[in-house]
């Protein structure tokens, strides 16, 4: 079972994603609501994959990504964001993100679930 750390400042998104991930048989290793918390949680729960929001208070996802990758280069981090700016997406990928997922992910939308699973499995180094 793949352990996922879920990071988003929106409690609504965290709640919805938690439900979706559990339904898809992923294990929630932990939850964080900003970049600083995410760094701590990542150390604490050693997830297989982290789903990381970009726009967050205290420390944004891009800075958080860089900090985690600095400490743990092997960390598998997929950005999960509503950001559409190609430059930001490019910077995340150049900074070591294993993928970029466009938010929102809708529970009833098979295409959304498919790209979610593909990104997680791909980041975890497994194939579906
Ligand atoms: Mg956000």
Image (cartoon, rainbow, N blue to C red):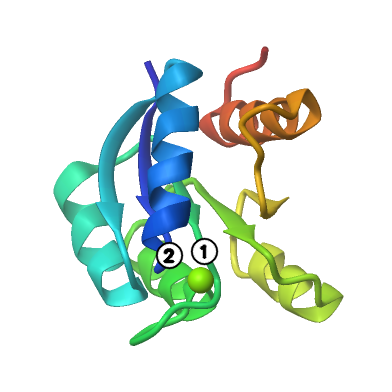
Mark in the foreground, 1 or 2 = 2
Q: Does the residue labelled 1 lie within 8 Å of ligand 1?
A: yes
Q: Which residue lies furthest to the left in this view?
A: 44
Q: Nearer the viewer, residue 67 or 3?
A: 3
- Look at the picture and state if 107 lies above or below 42: above
Percent coordinates x, y for residue 99 in the rendering: 67, 49
Reading the image, the residue beneath label 2 is 10
Q: What element carries label 1?
A: loop
**How far across and how far down the image is residue 108, in percent?**
68, 27
Q: Which residue is at the far bottom?
A: 58
Q: Which of 96/114 is in front?
A: 114
Q: Name the residue under label 1.
A: 53
How far across and down, in percent of the image, does residue 69 sit?
A: 43, 63
Please tell me how crowded label 1 is: few (under 14), some (14-19), or many (20+) other residues with Cα within 10 Å: many
**Contact (CB < 8 A) between labels 1 and 2?**
yes
Residue at 15% in and 50% down: 44
Displayed quadrant of residue 43: bottom left
Quarter holding the C terminus is top right
Q: In this view, does 85 lie above or below 92?
A: below
Residue 112, quarter of the rendered image? top right
User: What is the C-alpha distance between the residues marked 1 and 2?
Assistant: 9 Å
**In the image: residue 30, left or right of residue 7:** left
**Residue at left offset 38%, top offset 83%:** 59
Precedes in sequence: disc 1 or disc 2: 2
Query: 6 or 12, which is in the foreground?
Result: 12
Q: Does the residue labelled 2 lie within 8 Å of ligand 1?
A: yes
Query: In the rendered image, is residue 104 in sight?
Result: yes
Residue at the image position 24 percent from the left and 68 percent from the top: 37
């Amino acid at each position: 079972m793949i352990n996922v750390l879920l990071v988003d400042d929106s409690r609504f998104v965290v709640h919805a994603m938690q439900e979706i991930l559990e339904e898809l048989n992923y294990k929630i290793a932990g939850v964080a609501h900003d970049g600083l918390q995410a760094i701590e949680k990542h150390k604490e729960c050693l997830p297989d994959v982290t789903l990381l929001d970009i726009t967050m208070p205290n420390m944004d996802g891009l800075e958080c990504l860089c900090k985690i990758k600095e400490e743990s280069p092997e960390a598998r981090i997929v950005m999960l964001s509503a950001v559409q700016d190609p430059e930001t997406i490019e910077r995340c990928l150049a900074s070591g993100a294993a993928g970029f997922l466009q938010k929102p992910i809708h529970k009833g939308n098979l295409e959304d679930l498919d790209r979610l699973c593909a990104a997680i499995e791909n980041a975890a180094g497994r194939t579906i």
